[in-house]
Image (cartoon, helix red, strand yellow):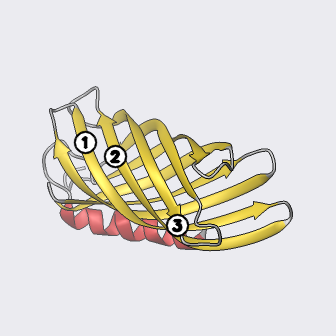
Amino acid sequence: MTTLLSAVGVCLILSSATASAEEDPAAVVELGGAGARSLKGGGSSYGADVAAEVTPIENWLELEVGVTPLFSRHSTEWDADLLFKKPWTLSRHVEFMIGAGPEWIHTRESGATTNAPGIEAVLDFMFWPSRKHRLGWFLEPGYDYSFGRGHETSLGISGGLLIGIREKSRGD
């Protein structure tokens, strides 16, 4: 968890140098719910989704650092990821991104704990009701592949609230 908080802090620092003077926020926080379904017969799991996103290269690269705890009847899984996303602005109110990146998967099942690296690919749809991009919502379907024992694969979806974090202007 300390690593995740450090990564979010680095993202926020990087964003202060790259934030545009227009309507885009310096960083975006994602808060929501998530669900995943194993493609190898492991069942479904549900939990929360928390992430922070910054734009180091406008119109070319967005970085997202997130953590998702998933719970099922007999297991708990914590996924921490770093996604590299290519954004497209479809309108003033809608953005679309395709992304992929590494993830760390910590699982506790039937008393046994395992850790494994993995990779995640996502489609990210962001909807902003106002031009100022202060509050919005997102929907993010994804695919996970674990390099751990059994090479678990799953399809998931997360969705929830977007909160735009503004850089304080010098006149404030």
Which part of the image, by quadrant, shows the N terminus?
bottom right
Secondary structure at badge 2 equals: strand
Residue beneath disc 3: 5
Q: Residues within 10 Å of mark 1 (few under 14, many from 20)?
A: some
What's the residue type where badge 2 is placed?
Answer: Leu
What's the residue type where badge 3 is placed?
Answer: Leu
Task: Give the mark nearest the N terminus, 3 or 2.
Answer: 3
Secondary structure at badge 3 equals: helix
User: Are the residues tagged 1 and 2 within 8 Å (C-beta)?
Assistant: yes
Query: Label 1, label 3: how many angstroms apart (C-alpha)?
Result: 26 Å
Residue beneath disc 2: 123
Residue beneath disc 1: 96
Quadrant in the rendering for residue 34: top right
Q: Is residue 106 left or right of residue 63?
A: right
x and y, in percent, of residue 26 in the image: 27, 54
Along the line of sight, the residue nearer the viewer: 92 or 157: 157
Residue at the far right in the pictured view: 111
What's the residue type where badge 1 is placed?
Answer: Phe
